Amino acid sequence: MILLCYDGSPSAQHALAVSRETLGSTPTTLLHVWSAPLEILADASFGTRSTSSESLRTTIERLSLERARTIADEGHERASGLGLAVETRTERSDTSVWQTILDVASETDADLIVVGTRGATAVQSLLLGSVSNALVHHSKRPVLLVPSETE
């Protein structure tokens, strides 16, 4: 089973096509990992607990989840259009995206993790970190990194 990470970016879209070309119709789980915008949630209460801030938190969570589902559905549609047999999962990350990916890979006993790169330079990756970099360094499973078509 292949775990194909999808965030809607051009490199993730390219990773779909490369997966189909390279791996054929191997059963695939398309995974979209999302995080609530923590900076907004952290500031929502402005130091107090109130009904309006809780309502704001709930609204932000709901909108974030809706966006995540939209991205996952778009990925499913693209993957199906390419002939991939996909099951789609949307997972919230409360830690880091890469750790959530590894947790799902472990849970599903994935044979391979496929992820598109974002095109970060080595310096950007070193300073800012990157999901693909963390996957390569922490995964006990094979990881296929697919650069975007423009790289």
Image (tube, rainbow, N blue to C red):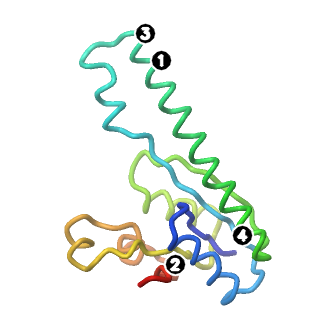
Image: 101 above or below 120: above
Which amino acid is tagged 3?
A: Thr
Q: Which residue is mark 1?
A: 55
Q: Residue furthest top?
A: 51
Question: In front: 102, or 40?
Answer: 40
First in sequence, mark 4 or 2: give its number.
4
Which labelled disc corresponds to residue 141? 2
Disc 2 element: loop
Q: CA distance from mark 3 to mark 2?
A: 45 Å
Q: Nearer the viewer, residue 102 or 63?
A: 63
Q: Residues within 10 Å of mark 1 (few under 14, many from 20)?
A: few
The span from disc 1 to disc 4 (Cα, nearest Å) is 36 Å
Quadrant that contains the C terminus: bottom left
Query: For the residues marked 2 and 1, what is the alpha-carbon distance in whole angstroms?
Result: 41 Å
The crowd level at tag 3 (other Cα within 10 Å; few <14, some 14-19, many 20+) is: few
5 w.r.t. 141: above or below: above
Residue at numbered disc 4: 79
Q: Residue at x 36, y 70 (%)?
A: 134
Q: Which residue is mark 3?
A: 51
Q: Residue at x 47, y 49 (%)?
A: 93
Would you say 1 lies left or right of 100 here?
Answer: right
Q: Position of residue 16 (x, y in %)?
A: 63, 75
Image quadrant where residue 85 sits = bottom right
Q: Are marks 2 and 1 in contact (CB under 8 Å)?
A: no
Estimate how packed mark 2 is, as few (under 14), some (14 to 19) or many (20 or more) residues with alpha carbons within 10 Å: some
How packed mark 4 is, by other alpha carbons closer than 10 Å (few <14, some 14-19, many 20 or more), is many
Q: CA distance from mark 3 to mark 4?
A: 42 Å
Evaluate if marks 1 and 3 touch, with contact meaning CB atoms under 8 Å apart.
Answer: yes
Q: Label 2 sits on what residue type?
A: Arg
Q: Residue furthest front?
A: 150
- Along the viewing direction, whichever of 102 and 126 lies nearer the viewer: 126
Q: Residue at x 70, y 67 (%)?
A: 78
